[in-house]
Amino acid sequence: MRWKNIRKSRNVEDRRGQRAGRRFGTGRPAGGGMKVGGGAGIILLLIGLFFGKDLIGPLSSGGAGIGAGTQGPTLTQGTGTTVRSNDEAADFIASILGTTETVWGELFAQAGQQYQPPKLVLFEDGVNSACGFTSSAAGPFYCPGDYKVYIDLSFFRELQKMGAGGDFAQAYVLAHEVGHHVQNLLGVSMAVQRRQRALPKVQANRLSVLTELQADCYAGVWAHHAHNRYQLLEPGDLEEGMNAAAKIGDDALMRSAGRRAHPDAFTHGTSQQRQTWLYRGLENGDHQVCDTFRDVS
Ligand SMILES: [Zn+2]
């Protein structure tokens, strides 16, 4: 990817080197902070390694586009601490975050809305958020309760070990989490969570999968516009992203854990579904094509 000359986001909070203890009874979000995609067992542990623990805000079923029912949060901007110098991994993430701010800022503006960018927290080992304490083993996540994306950069080494390395694969992971932030801003997170509470577990889980696929599609929308604006993608990048989407599909993860693919336990969608939605957003650039909930009645 060509990212070295891109403005770095200032919305990065560097908490690396800080000790995060488990704290109880703190920081429960008022709503929308529920950890989605729960379940049990070793499969989930493994899936959790690969951004399975997005503390998402799902998107609306009715195909809510940008501007639909938006009640933006009040966020402070530009107060993030600077990342360490000589820190290419963090510089990269800050630059990619900057492109998401530009792209989503423009898309929201086109719909007459103001985009409130998320903060990005870099951490090591574990972190406290409005969603509680989360270990690095859970992978990157978005907490709708505090509008922040949390990433332990060591996750990208795990991704590489899975055969999903490359800078565009990393950018896709970040853009996916920012996709959850967009979903949260669009006000659909709450709608889906409300609906999930009234559904049996299997159907509720299915809504979580659709939410995840939409975040993939939004990552594609970001890539489309970021490339048009910054010529971000180089030969091979698209393949890297598609490869990553395949490697972190639920069926692939389950198989690599020595288990049979079990659709009821899916949290993020199959390899094929993830590739399909990422590509759909990427090809089209229109967030309206990301209505993964279309067929849900
Ligand atoms: Zn996700």
Image (cartoon, helix red, strand yellow):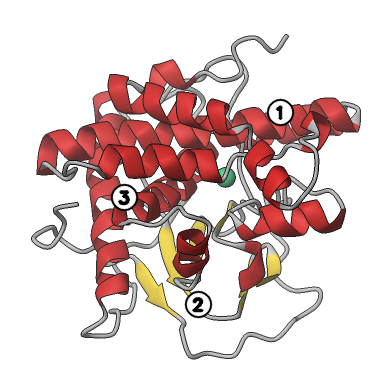
Q: Name the side, left or right, on which 143 lies relative to 2.
A: right
Q: Name the side, left or right, on which 203 lies relative to 133.
A: right
Q: Secondary structure at mark 2?
A: loop
Q: How far from the left and from the top, in percent, is residue 39?
A: 84, 48
Within-10-Å neighbours for mark 2: few <14, some 14–19, many 20+: many
Cβ(mark 3) to ligand 1 < 8 Å?
Answer: no
Q: Which residue is mark 2?
A: 123
Q: Secondary structure at mark 1?
A: helix
Residue 72 visible in this rendered orientation of the protein: no
Q: Nearer the viewer, mark 3 or mark 2?
A: 3
Amino acid beneath label 1: Leu
Foreground: 130 or 281? Answer: 281
Residue occupying image coordinates x 49% and y 59%: 159
Q: Which residue is mark 3?
A: 168
Q: Which quadrant: the C terminus?
A: top right
Q: Which residue is mark 1?
A: 207
Do the residues bearing badges 2 and 1 touch, measured as CB atoms within 8 Å? no
- Ligand 1 - quadrant of the structure image: top right
Picture layout, residue 10 above or below residue 239 = below
Amino acid beneath label 3: Phe
Residue occupying image coordinates x 57% and y 33%: 271
Q: Nearer the viewer, mark 3 or mark 1?
A: 3
Of labels 2 and 1, earlier in sequence is 2
Q: Quadrant of residue 165?
A: bottom left
Q: How far from the left and from the top, in percent, is residue 45?
A: 75, 59
Foreground: 85 or 105? Answer: 85
Of labels 3 and 1, earlier in sequence is 3
Q: Name the side, left or right, on which 220 lies relative to 54.
A: left
Work out how far the residue at label 3 is from the one at label 1, CA to CA, in angstroms. Answer: 27 Å
Picture layout, residue 149 above or below residue 203 = below
Of labels 3 and 2, earlier in sequence is 2
